[in-house]
Image (cartoon, helix red, strand yellow):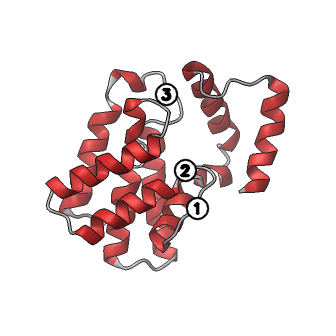
Amino acid sequence: MESDLINKAYTFAESVFRDRSFENRPFHNLAHTKDVVSAVEEIGTHTELTDDEMESALIAAWLHDIGYLEGDGDHELKAAEKARELLQSWGASQKKIHDVSDAILATKVPQQPRSLIGRVLCDADLYHLSAESCLDKAVKLRAEWETHGTQPMSDTEWLQKNPEFLEGH
């Protein structure tokens, strides 16, 4: 699906992820964002999102991790705030702004989506858990956490944390 707002979100996200601060992000980067967008298209189609809902979900997918530009803390809130600002400047409706920002906020772990759009985005954000590349992605996430000092953990802690996260999901 294409629209002017989706194209603007894609262009903005692509420019954010080209920033040097993302060079040390082996997980939360443009590749992850493209994976989430692809998963939104797949899940959204099977969920029978309307065109308007699909547009909102895709915009949210492109913008959901742009908050990492300002650091790890509250990155979902930062991304949602930036999405609101961008969408308003692009002439989006208040409903569109709400739907996109609400979906982005829902991706904060533990995920608590309040709408179908939010549920689709949350599932898409963790879609990699169902992929053959799940272990590779987990290694990249751990490396990112260690680089940024967010959640450094021993091998034992890591081996305990992953099954707990999967079971919780």
Q: How far apart are marks 3 and 1 (CA)?
A: 25 Å
**Side of 96 where 57 appears, left or right:** right
- Quarter of the figure with residue 6: bottom left
**What mark, if any, has residue 143 been given in the picture?**
none
Q: How far apart are marks 2 and 1 (CA)?
A: 8 Å
Q: In this view, does 29 lie above or below 156?
A: below
Q: Where is residue 110 in the image (x, y as percent from the top left)?
A: 63, 53
Label 2 SS: loop
At a point 42% along the width and 77% down the height, the residue shown is 49
Residue pointed to by mark 1: 112
At a point 31% along the width and 42% down the height, the residue shown is 13
Q: Position of residue 55 (x, y in %)?
A: 32, 67
Residue pointed to by mark 2: 108
Q: Quadrant of the C terminus?
A: bottom right
Q: Distance between the residues labelled 3 and 2?
A: 18 Å
Of the two numbered discs 3 and 1 on the same chain, state the one appearing first in sequence.
3
**Side of 154 where 94 appears, left or right:** left
Q: Position of residue 46 (x, y in %)?
A: 52, 75
Count of marks overlaid on the render = 3
Label 3 SS: loop
At a point 41% along the width and 54% down the height, the residue shown is 61
Indicate the amino acid at tag 2. Lys
Disc 2 crowd, CA 10 A, few/some/many (<14, 14-19, 20+): some
Q: Position of residue 151 (x, y in %)?
A: 65, 28
Label 1 SS: loop
Residue pointed to by mark 3: 25
**Side of 56 where 24 appears, left or right:** right
Of the two numbered discs 3 and 2 on the same chain, state the one appearing first in sequence.
3
Q: In which quarter of the image is the N terminus?
A: bottom left
Disc 1 crowd, CA 10 A, few/some/many (<14, 14-19, 20+): some
